[in-house]
Image (tube, coloured by chain):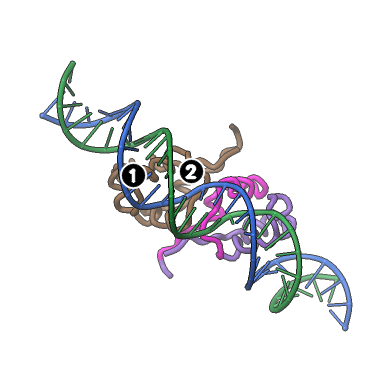
Chain colours: A purple, B brown, C green, D blue
Amino acid sequence: MAIIVNLDVMMAKRKISAGELSDAVGITPANLSILKNNKAKAVRFSTLCRLCEVLDCQPGDILEYRKED
Amino acid sequence: MAIIVNLDVMMAKRKISAGELSDAVGITPANLSILKNNKAKAVRFSTLCRLCEVLDCQPGDILEYRKED
DNA sequence: TAAAAAATTATCGAAAAACAATAAATTAAT
DNA sequence: ATTAATTTATTGTTTTTCGATAATTTTTTA
C-alpha cells in the first residue's frame, strides 16, 4: 500500500541518464536520486511538472499505486 | 504547463461526495477542497495513496500534466 | 424562496518534508 | 585500476502540508 516512483522506464525510453535528467529538470542529482529510489515522501507539482515536461510523459507514467507491501 | 488535479471524474464514477471522501481519506474537508480545486502545490504520497485506495484508482486517474497555460 | 447542508476560502500555527549545498561512499563504466 | 556516475548522508533553509477553526459562498432541499 504505497505510491511507487518509477522513473527508470521513461528514462530508458528517452535514453537519458540521472545526471542529465537532474540537470534538465533543475534539481540536484542527490534529490533526483531520493525521488528515483522511493525515498521521498512527497512531490511538489513544480518538480513533477518539469519531470513530465523533460520526459514528455504523464504523471501516470511515473507514479503508481500498489496495494501490496 | 502545470499539473492538474482532477478528482471530480473519479468521484463521480464512485458516486462519492467531497465530504465522504475527506472522511474516508482522513483529511479535513478544507484540505481536500484545496487539493481538489488545484490550490495545492504538492502532495504527500501518504495522501495520494489513500485517495487512490478509497477511489480504487491510479495516480494517473487523478493527476494530469498539461502543456498549455 | 427560505432554510439547511455542503463545499469553498481564509487564517494561524505547527510539523513535515523538499531542496540546495556539500561531502563521503558506493556502484558502474572504461 | 581509474574515472565517472550515482547513491547516501548531513545540515540548514525554505516551502508547503495539514489540523483546527471560522467565515463565506454555493448547492440542495423542503
Residue in front for this viewpoint, D11 or B8: D11
For the N terminus of chain B, give its image quadrant.
top right
In the visual, does D6 lie left or right of A46?
Answer: right
Q: Chain of mark 2?
A: B
Label 2 – label 1 distance at C-alpha: 14 Å
Residue C11 image offset from top left, x and y in percent: 43, 38
Residue C12 image offset from top left, x and y in percent: 43, 43
| Residue name at image x 45 percent, y 63 percent | A2
Q: Is residue B64 among what the camera can see?
A: yes
Splitting the image into 4 quarters, where does residue D25 fall? top left
Q: Chain of mark 1?
A: B
Q: Start and end of the magenta stretch?
A: A39-67
Disc 2: CA contacts within 10 A as few (<14), some (14-19) or many (>=20) = some
Above or below residue D3? Residue B23 is: above
Name which residue type carries label 1: Pro
Name which residue type carries label 2: Ala
Describe the element under mark 2 as helix, strand or loop.
Answer: loop
Residue in front for this viewpoint, A22 or C23: C23
Residue in front for this viewpoint, A23 or B63: A23
Q: Which residue is mark 2?
A: B40
Q: First in sequence: mark 2 or mark 1?
A: 1
